[in-house]
Amino acid sequence: MQLSQYMHNQFAINPAMVGSSGELDMTAAVRGQWLGLEGRPFSQTFTAQMPVPLLKGGWGLSVSNDMLGAQRDTRVNLAYAYHLSLGAKQRLSFGAQAGIAQSGLRGDLLITPDGSYADGAIDHQDDALPFNTANAIAPLLAVGAHLQLQSLSIGLSAQQLMFSSLSFPSSSSDIAQQLSPQLNVALAYALSLSSSLALTPRLLAKSDLKQMQLDASVMLTIDQRWYAGVGFRGYNANTIDAIMAYVGAHLNEKTFLGYSYDIGLSGLNDHHAGSHELVFKYTIRNLLSVKSGKVRYNPRFL
């Protein structure tokens, strides 16, 4: 799943970020990719996370749904992260998440070169392909680490570590889709320009051990409330994909709204009208806190 505004919800790419903000955080994102192209990707994500001071970390829930052509992919994960303080504004975190992937393949939307589809009939002339919707389930596992050093942020995560596959049943034999491991490396550095301005360049490298993609961006923050930035996806002639434009704002103390538009640069550019992505975040501050001092036991609960 492609996310241009991953910086507003890093839990989506690294379980070590769960609970790191110290707040109850619920984030929803909707992405319509390659508008105008038939069968284009359409994605939705939801995450909820909160700190757990007694466990020195945080826990979270993530739900995602991705539709591409004839296939739908839905995932549910639970995550936990341990946060170790290294000093003022410095922290080392480790996280893990586990869950399931449930996918559906609509055979009625598939078309083969030799198939027959007259009068609503479906005959793929291929017994390996389903005629209706075939479903498959596979386990998921991901781990991550994150290091925060004053203004520098370094994250590393690995997803789909079960080496599992989605097996879609058909009349002759199952169709297997391998879930290959994916590695993510995220770097960010916050530069304070003045009391009200900050500039944050970021890099995100993604790889499935066969190919790689790179997102580079820079975000300007005004009064810790307004956001604007640009980004670029790709690192050579074969991977250049898009230019991204970002805007966002804290509408009030609890809500944030972000929008991005991807201008396509790949060979598909003549066939679509770009990609839109919307992020909404709701935050409750100081939900849980642990204060130092004496511990007093209530005899009613002993």
Image (cartoon, helix red, strand yellow):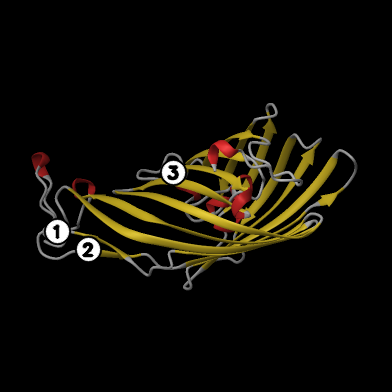
- What's the amino acid at mark 3? Ser
Q: Which residue is mark 3?
A: 43
- Residue that appears at 19% across and 58% down: 113
For numbered disc 3, what is the local secondary structure?
Answer: strand
Residue 81, disc: none
* Comes first in the chain, label 3 or label 2: 3
For numbered disc 2, what is the local secondary structure?
Answer: strand
Q: Is residue 67 visible?
A: yes
Q: Which residue is mark 2?
A: 175
- Residue 10: x %, y % from top left: 60, 51
Residue 170, disc: 1
- Residue that appears at 14% across and 50% down: 131
- Residue that appears at 22% across and 63% down: 175
- What's the amino acid at mark 1? Ser
Q: Residue furthest top?
A: 252
Task: Measure how far apart labels 1 and 2 are at the Cα level.
Answer: 7 Å
For label 1, the crowd category at 10 Å Cα-Cα, with few meaning under 14, some 14 to 19 and many 20 or more, is: some
